[in-house]
Image (cartoon, rainbow, N blue to C red):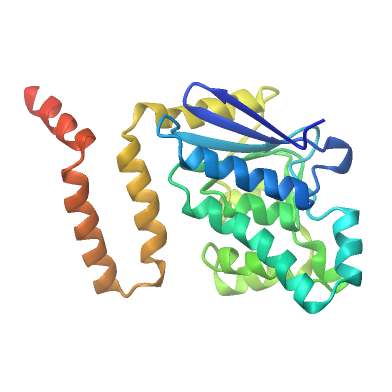
């Protein structure tokens, strides 16, 4: 049985973590399959969005037992290589062109919470729970700190990373981390319908907006404004924009 199921509905790619008996825990194979699927999606001009979800009751519980056993016996260099493999997954989600949506049902814990946070948007079932329990076993939610700190205040991020408690989808919605909560037995279809909104929009405009949003994070205000001006000028030259302006003027 494949650890990752890959489907497509219209212009939406669905990536389903398929280890329900392991609460969709991450191992080397699943991480590699995710990275491969994301790279293929990035190269597909027909795709408008990607949805990552989990089979069964949970989204993803983080590293599986075999991964933890490997960590316990590995050298520093081996552990660094392993950590960079997961970090590469987080970076890849941010760097590919299409919006990536996490559809979280059940629990998203440790690396699983990190996977959801790495996505551009999170939609969650209103019963979903999130957390970083790593600190309870002496582990550090380290790579994800770079993402969390960009999405939360310093104090909120510190509490979330160090207390190890679980957080409800509703609380994360109030903090602006979860874009929306869904209370519906048709959760998956609801998220897909949300993703399909991107089929009605300009692909080039959405993709350029995603790149700009992340590129300006490290810039000064003046540099960010200049970057925006350059992207604005580039967008005006795209086929989508030219057609959009012509259609608007015809009215």
The total number of labels drawn is 0
Residue at the bottom extreme, as displayed: 76
Which residue is at a point 19% across and 37% down the rendered structure image? 241
- Regarding residue 17, the answer to whether it shows in the image is yes
The C terminus, quarter of image: top left
Which residue is at a point 88% across and 64% down the rendered structure image? 70
Looking at the rendering, which quadrant does residue 102 occupy? top right
Image spot of residue 187 (x, y percent): 65, 28
Looking at the image, is 138 positioned above or below residue 53? Answer: below
Image spot of residue 49 (x, y percent): 48, 35
Looking at the image, is 146 positioned above or below residue 242? Answer: below
The N terminus, quarter of image: top right
Which residue is at a point 17% across and 29% down the rendered structure image? 243
Image spot of residue 44 (x, y percent): 45, 35
- Regarding residue 123, the answer to whether it shows in the image is no
Give left or right: position of 126 versus 118: right
Looking at the rendering, which quadrant does residue 225 occupy? bottom left
Which residue is at a point 78% across and 54% down the rendered structure image? 62
Image spot of residue 250 (x, y percent): 7, 22
Looking at the image, is 113 positioned above or below residue 39? Answer: below
Looking at the rendering, which quadrant does residue 207 occupy? top left
């Amino acid at each position: 049985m494949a650890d990752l199921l890959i489907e497509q509905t219209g212009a939406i790619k669905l990536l389903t973590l398929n280890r329900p008996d392991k609460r969709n825990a991450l191992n080397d194979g699943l991480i590699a399959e995710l990275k491969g699927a994301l790279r293929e999606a990035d190269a597909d001009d027909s795709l408008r969005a990607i949805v990552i979800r989990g089979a069964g009751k949970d989204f993803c519980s983080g590293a599986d037992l075999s991964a933890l056993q490997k960590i316990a016996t590995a050298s520093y260099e081996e552990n660094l290589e392993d950590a960079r493999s997961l970090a590469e997954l987080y970076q890849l989600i941010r760097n590919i062109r299409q919006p990536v949506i996490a559809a979280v049902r059940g629990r998203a814990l440790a690396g699983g919470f990190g996977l959801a946070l790495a996505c551009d948007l999170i939609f969650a079932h209103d019963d979903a729970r999130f957390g970083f329990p790593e600190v309870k076993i002496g582990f550090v939610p380290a790579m994800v700190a770079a993402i969390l700190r960009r999405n939360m205040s310093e104090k909120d991020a510190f509490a979330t990373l160090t207390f190890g408690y679980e957080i409800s989808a509703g609380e994360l919605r109030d903090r602006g981390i979860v874009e929306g909560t869904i209370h519906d037995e048709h959760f998956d279809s609801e998220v897909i319908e949300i993703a399909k909104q991107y089929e009605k929009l300009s692909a080039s405009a959405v993709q350029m907006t995603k790149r700009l949003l992340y590129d300006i994070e490290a810039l000064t205000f003046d540099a960010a404004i200049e970057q925006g001006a350059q992207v604005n000028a580039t967008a005006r030259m795209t086929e989508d924009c030219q057609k959009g302006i012509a259609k608007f003027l015809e009215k």
